[in-house]
Each structure stands twice: as C-alpha cells, then as structure tokens.
Image (spheres, helix red, strand yellow):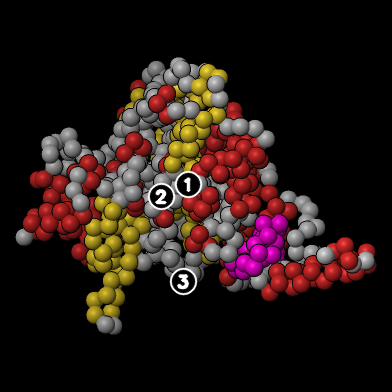
Amino acid sequence: MTADFSFDQKRYLEGFMAGAQALRAVQNGAMPVGVATAGHEGPDKTHLEAQDKTTAAGGKLADQEKWKRTEHPFDAYARLKAEAKSGVHPKPDDNFRWRFHGLFYVAPAQTSYMCRLRIPNGILSSWQFEGAAALAEKYAGGYCHVTTRANLQLREIQPENAPDLIEGLAAIGLVAKGSGADNIRNVTGHATAGIDPQELIDTRPLANAWHNHILNDRSLYGLPRKFNVAFDGGGIIPTLEETNDIAFQAVMVGAGASFEGALIEPGLWLRLGLGGITGHKDLARDTGVILRPEEAIDIADAIVRVFIDHGDRTNRTKARLKYVLDAWGFPKFIEAVEEKLGRKLTKIDPHFVAPRPGFDRFAHIGVRAQKQPGLNWLGVALAVGKLTAEQMRALAAIARRFGDGDIRLTVWQNLLISGISDARIEDAIAGVAAAGLGTNANALRAGLVACTGNRGCKFANADTKSHALDIAAHVETRVALDQPINIHLTGCHHSCAQHYVGDIGLVGAKVDVDEDTQVEGYNVVIGGGFGADARIARELFSGVKASDAPVLVERLLKTYLSQRSGPEESFQAFANRHDVEALKALFAEAAA
C-alpha cells in the first residue's frame, strides 16, 4: 500500500501517527517528552523507554511512574531542603520522591519522617553506630529500630530536621539513598560473615560490591517496584535469602556435574534463586543456575535490567519481579538475562549440589565461638528491635573496648558484637547488662519478630510491637518450650516482619466487634519456614482480637506440645503434618 504514496505523503503519515501516539501517551499518563517512543538520553533512558512502551500499548502509568517522570527524585533534593526550612509536610508525590532519599513521611501514624539506612551485610563500625545514636538524639526521637533486613531506622524526624539528618549520616559514612520506594533496598548477607566456623564464603565483599555498584549507577533507581537482594554464605544464622527477589546461596558442587557437555569444576559456587516476595505468598525458587562469586554483580545487574524493561508500570500490586516470572516462566526470563549478559549461564542438575550446612536458631543470642581461635561473638537480645541512643552508645563502647569494633545487625531484629576474646567475654556481658539489655533469651523471645506497627506506619492495622511483647509476657510464664519457636507479627499485607515464614504468623486486621465498632486484631497463619524447611504458612484463624492473641498463642503451643509425635518434632513439622481443619479440631479440643 505504501508504494502508492509519494515521499512527502509518507512523511506526513508518519508524522501524523507519531503525533497520535504521543497524544495517547499523554492521555494515559506519560509526559510529552518528544515522540513517545524515542529520543531519550542519559541514565533514566531505559526507564523512560519502558514507560513509553507501556503507554504506546494503551496502558496507563501508575501515579508513581508519572511522579518519577515529572521530576526525578534525585533532581529534587534542593526543593526538599527548601521545603524543610519552612517545616512543610510533603504532598503524596513528594512523599514518594523523598523515599529515594531514605525519608518516609508516616502521617497519620506520626506527623514526622522515618529514615531508613543502607548498611551492606548489616555491619557497621562502633563509631558509626555511636554517630547514628547522636543523630537520633539530635534530629529524631532518640532511638533506633533494627529491621528485618539487618538495617536501622530512625523515627520521629521533623521535616525541618530531615536534610540535616541525611547529611549527618553521610558525614559518618552511612547513606540512605534509595532505601525506599522503587529501588534496590539494603543488601543482606549472613550476620556472621568472616567469623563463622561453618560458613562456605564470607559474604561481606559481595554485599559491599553490590552496594557500591548500586550507589554509583543512577540507571538502577526508579524500578517498577522495590527490589531485594541477599547473599547467604552458609553461616549458622539464617539469612532468609529466599524472601528476596534475588537469592544468592553459597553451595558446594560435587564432581561429575556438567553443562553443555563440559564438566564443571567442583567446589564453591553460588546458586541463583529468584522471585521471593512473602507478602504475595512466594519464596525465591531455584533457577538451576550456578555461578562463580566473581560473576554475581554482573548477573544481578542483568536481572535488574530485565526487570526494568519488563516490570509492570501500571499496576503496583503486580509490579514485582515475581509477576514477570509468573507471566514468562523461568526459562524465558533466564534467556532474557543471558541476552543482557551476552553469554550463557551455567546450569546443572541439582543432584550435584551438596545440602546447605544447618542452622542454629539460637546462634544470634548469647556467646558463640568464632573460627578465629580465642574469639567470640556476643548476641544481644533486643525487645522487638528497639534501642535507645544511650544503649547504642554503650554497645559501641563495648565493641571498641572488648571486641573488634564491629556491630553486626541481624534479620532477627537484634545485633552481634564480634571479636571478643575469651578473657573479656564476661566483661562484655556485664557491660550489656549495665545498658539494660541482655544476652540470653528464652525459646519464644529469641524468635519474636515484629514490624513497626501502627504507632509508626500508616499501613499497619495493629500495634505489633506492643502486642508481640504482650504475647511473650503471657506465654513464657505458662508454656515451657524445649524447641525454638518463631512468632512474627506484621501490621499489614506488606509483610515487613515476614509473617508467612514464621512458625506462627500474625498479620494485622481490623476486627468487627459490632456494626459500629472495630478493634485491632490479627489473622493467624502457621507452619511457615525457611532454609531447607522453606514454606509459606497457611491461614488457621481470621479476625482474632489483639486482646485475645496471647491466650490463642498459648493454646496453640500447648496443643503442639501435647500432640507432637515426639520431643524432636518441630512446631512446623507438627503443623504441616495436619490439614487446617484437623488443626482447628485439635485446638478446639485443647481449649475445651
């Protein structure tokens, strides 16, 4: 047909179609940046092209995509500072933008900001820890929370103090850049990296390399949604890497494995898992790919860039990596990663991969011997992750005086002080006690995890931290546990406390008391797990009032102790040996 048109007519038609396409893009939420499908340059090019592709296909960009396009958050820092001087509270678009700088405005829970940091592998120096305490005291609420990504959050930051806090963190070598919104979050590794007698690899170099790779490449910011990466080195403390979008797991490969007819060198490799997002009831699954540690950063980069190109930019509930994997399947996704890399990835039969070394679910609390002779780490128990500035200063002094100067945060909302000699361990324990903290915890408190809750998060339906402590105080005097138990309380479906991998998980919900009254409460799931026992928990009860939760947990644990097959059977094994209706019947019998 086009052979019948003159050259000028062809150009006219092309221009007309381009204009129509641009108009449709604007109507669907894209900004009119040149012709909608071409002409972008600079570090944001791939993101803008992905947005253009969406609108050209008739899709409507999510509000957050429009906000990123109207003004990139990293280009708006001067405006953040100007608004802070007058104490202005952010509108929704700026509330989103400021999260690229680590600042979350958490109204109506609190009319203030929360600041989340980036601490690769969860390890910081004692002087950084002490510096964070000083900043928390000067610009925030005088305390910090240890998070389930082995990270720190500072809270109750007034708008006028926010820039000073961010810049104060930078002055002590800590950053918050990209710790919120549509970015790659704080990278985790196993808490005892470099000191663990059973580890297969020290994950600190990998976590630091990925951390710095992200910080120095703007094109890795502004993804379709947030993105989590973890490195598990085979240490004794679980890393929960299967809850991440990318899970790198250190493994030993035996002799005889081959790929495309060539034998694979046996020894240390990393196994690649993809697609973990527990709030959407999925754990990272093995891709069959193994890689050398030195390949990890390039491969992670390629995975993220495939996600940038193909993640959903219209529907925020479907915008995580899991949904690309669900739509494409793993083979197609791996092919796209290989295309980015320009080479094949190594795949082997999992039969040649040795089982991971086991966990000790109490190893993050108390004294444990390091692989360095005569040295120990000391796990400090925290009440659902909270530390006052005074306690932080005391712990920093203990780390300097008795240890190697490191503070190691864990995904279990506590911390370790490492490098303490046998001769000084009692002094360190006494110092921790003098700070009002402990180095012992019973089977329940050692595995008690809670998100921020509705005191500091607008999404939460319940005061999770207070309710977690209520449950612990009630149960520990009534139930004698001889097996570790993980109880996770999270305030909403975002699952910041990973309730689906707990033995018992409670997710916040509003519970109707009558037609006019609602109270805080929970839906209860049981039987979740991680590592070799990784599994998404099943819902057992819904609409449980928070005031009833302590008694409910007590009865669940008593039912487990009376009905388990033997003293070695874990709560998870017991729970998953029965279907939900059978568990309800056992519980009802115990409650009668």
Viewer-proximal residue among 409 and 128 = 409
The disc placed on residue 426 is none
Work out whether 566 lies above or below 540.
above
Q: Quadrant of residue 82?
A: bottom right
Number of the front mark, 1 or 3: 1
The residue beneath circle 1 is 275
Q: Which residue is mark 3?
A: 108
* Residue at x-position 82% and y-position 71%: 16
Q: Give the magenta-colored segment's residue range.
A: 48-74
Q: Would residue 108 be counted in the magenta stretch?
A: no
Give the residue at mark 2: 282
Marks 1 and 2, the one that precedes in the sequence: 1
Q: Nearer the viewer, residue 362 or 145?
A: 362
Which tag, 2 or 3, sits closer to the chain's start? 3
Helix, strand or loop under label 1: loop
Marks 1/2: CA distance? 7 Å
| Secondary structure predominantly adopted by residues drawn in magenta | helix
**196 and 175: which is toward the camera:** 196
Q: Residues under labels 2 and 3: Cα distance?
A: 30 Å
Find out whether the residues at labels 1 and 2 contact each other: C-beta distance under 8 Å. Answer: yes
Residue visible at 17% across and 34% down in the picture: 568
Q: Secondary structure at mark 2?
A: loop
Instruction: Give the image location of residue 458, x and y in percent.
Output: 44, 67
Left or right position of 307 against 501? right
Q: Secondary structure at mark 3?
A: loop
